[in-house]
Image: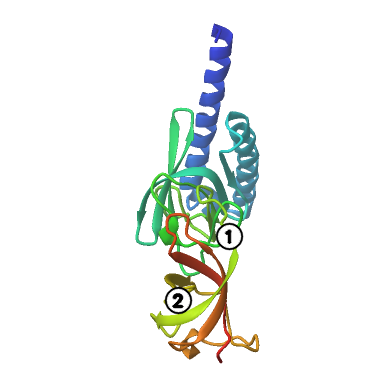
Amino acid sequence: MNTQNKSTKTKAIWGVMSTLAIAALLFTGLTGAAYANSGNEKSVGKEIAGKLEGRINEMVRKQDPATEVSMGGNGKVAVSNAKVLSVSGSTITARVSFGAYNMDWTVITDSNTKFAREKGNANALSDIKIGDTINFVGPINTTATSPTITATLVRDVSLKSQVQHLFEGTIVSLSASTTPATALIKIGGTNYTVNIPSGISVLNKNWQVVSIGSYQVGNTVRLYGSAEASSTSVINATVIRNTSI
């Protein structure tokens, strides 16, 4: 690489870093005087925020098309290509990097957070591991001292989509009367652990929605789902139907 190319690349990296630094100042000042005084100051602040957002998006895309931090005027943030540093309880810490500059995000999840795999298949917080690459969306926490959002969606792009299959078997045991629940189901002579998350269709033989609590040991069920990549005996159900009731 010649000196001119090195110089251009260095300027690009520092440009991104400078822009993000300004954005950080703007972030920490969201509750400050510029947004607390007159309506005119608030309008000017929003205009500046909009311009910074566009500038950040442009420069980030030029540096790495897979890494992006988008900040909307409504306070929502979309971050892509973040590396998971830790998962503690319902909180994920993830990092996006622009050259030598790192930005660590605290991603808070709750009952309203949706989790997905690379191509949209549902998954759970428990599937997300350190080192995974995630994209996330949610409103920014303006009172936090570091970048923090409450995520409405977390997509783990390290988890590839799983092929869905139809299974039929007999219930051996059921862990709970409400979802989420885990069932042990005998399919073709082998016992499989079936994860039944909240929000999926739980049906009877007439295709009516029922409670998982109405399912009993010995009932025959048909389920649509995918086998865990790391296990040949675990199935994640997306639809389950009891043909005995």
Q: Residue at left 61%, top 53%?
A: 119
Q: In this view, does 125 lie above or below 4?
A: below
- Amino acid found under the numbered disc labelled 2: Lys
* Farthest left residue in view: 88
Residue nearest the observer in this picture, 133 or 176: 176
Q: In this view, does 175 lie to the left or right of 204?
A: left
Question: In the rendered image, which residue does mark 1 sit on?
Answer: 121
Other-residue count near label 1 (Cα within 10 Å), few / some / many at <14 / 14–19 / ≥20 = some
Image location of residue 12, percent across then percent down? 56, 23
| CB atoms of marks 1 and 2 within 8 Å | no
Real-space Cα distance between discs 1 and 2? 25 Å
- Amino acid found under the numbered disc labelled 1: Asn
Image location of residue 78, percent across then percent down? 57, 49
Residue nearest the observer in this picture, 198 or 212: 212
What mark, if any, has residue 186 been given in the picture? 2
Other-residue count near label 2 (Cα within 10 Å), few / some / many at <14 / 14–19 / ≥20 = some
